[in-house]
Image: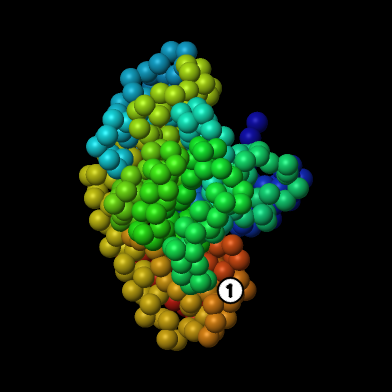
Amino acid sequence: MTQHATSNTELLQRKNAATPRGVGVMCDFYADRALNAELWDVEGRRFIDFAAGIAVLNTGHRHPKLLEAMRAQMERFTHTAYQIVPYASYVELAERINAITPGAHAKKTALFSTGAEAVENAIKIARAATGRSAVIAFSGAFHGRTMMGMALTGKVAPYKLGFGPFPGEIYHAPFPTALHGVSSEDALAAVAGLFKSDVDPRRVAAIIIEPVQGEGGFYAAPAEFMRGLRQLCDEHGILLIADEVQSGFARTGKLFAMEHYDVLPDLMTMAKSLAGGMPLAAVCGRAEIMDAPAPGGLGGTYAGNPIAVASALAVLDVIAEENLVARGARLGQQLKDQLNELRSAIPAIGEVRGPGAMVAVEFVQPGSSKPDAEFAKRVQNHALQNGLLLLTCGSYGNVIRFLFPLTIQDNVMDEALQILTAALRQA
């Protein structure tokens, strides 16, 4: 029998007794219900949700079209395991992803359950297609908490502490960040340097990159850097994997962040907002590459769960019907304008950046580019005390990222910006 608690304090004590400390939890309150961009805790306090389940809720909490689609599927069946008894909705979602991802070439899509699982399978597919084993990733990258995901991730604490050894033949190069003095030219030279000092390019199966780094701080890869990577990949027969787990589904002012570039990836990973809160992920790529693994080489018991697939099909409808690509771009610009207006009054603001609604503000010690994580923490705490949920990120924890649902009502957005402004001034 489920125990219903009405006290955050009681739940915190039970959580500490029943669950391990390795599952870090940011908030000291417990969710009771949520709708669109608002969330209420078990004591009835209201919060505006600018975390959105870590970029999962681009279509908001409990969108009625998603609920309707899931209910309809639950009336039919909840699980068969697609590899045992397939169903039409999986095929339909694969067709739609193939059609909406960048590039007119023939594509195929496989469904999984989590972003980390999508990344793992993209590496498996790349290795099967090329007959090579090495992979290059970037500093500041986040690709998941599985063993391969951790190996690819370019941040030690907290993700890698105490968990090694990691899979071999993973190499890291610096990600271009102008604020910290790393140009596209520097970063491309570093990749070329790996070929001189660490790994024969003919051993490299793939280069994996987030077009806009998520956990790393919402740095967008410059266009010339993405072009340079594509050129290196073409020259050496390497596959380019775009990890769009956090940047996908209208977050960047395009349906996918790779649409901001004039080059195409060979494989793409996606998850998070794909199914609006249900666990679903996908790998989409060139048809001939996707067909490299033998039958049985890909899959998973829950991969492409029918309820999650129903939700994902509804997500794609909602993004189109509510024009969330354009809405995200407008709301993101509103936020960036507000933050830029505050720069003269708040010298700790080092940079405001990000395409579309994938916006971040980086805090530095005034007059320098030295990270100021304490300032970011104070802003986050002030905002939380006043009912606005914010996430930090970045290699130094000095960046606040904004992941509001793209469906947020205008008046709720305005209220959130007032709370944010006050938090910045108080910090």
**Rendering quarter of residue 405:** bottom left
Q: Nearer the viewer, residue 63 or 82?
A: 82
* Local crowd size for mark 1, using a 10 Å CA cut-off: few (<14), some (14–19), many (≥20): many
Q: On the image, numbered disc 1 is attached to which residue?
A: 371
Give x and y (percent) for residue 422: 47, 78
Q: Secondary structure at mark 1?
A: loop
Identify which residue is drawn at 59% across, 45% down. Answer: 199
Asked if 155 appears above or below 181 in the picture, the reply is: above
Quarter of the picture containing the N terminus is top right
Q: Relative to 84, is 382 on the left or the right?
A: right
Of residues 387 and 58, the one nearer the viewer is 58
Q: Residue at x 39, y 21 (%)?
A: 75
- Residue at the image position 48 percent from the left and 83 percent from the top: 346
| Residue 362 to residue 114: above or below | below
**Residue found 32% across the figure and 35% down from its top:** 97
* Quadrant, the C terminus: bottom right
Please say whether residue 283 is visible from this viewpoint.
Answer: yes
Q: Residue furthest top?
A: 85
Residue furthest out toward the front: 196
Tell which of 169 and 278 is nearer to you.
Answer: 169
Amino acid carrying label 1: it is Pro
Q: Residue 9: name its quadrant.
A: bottom right
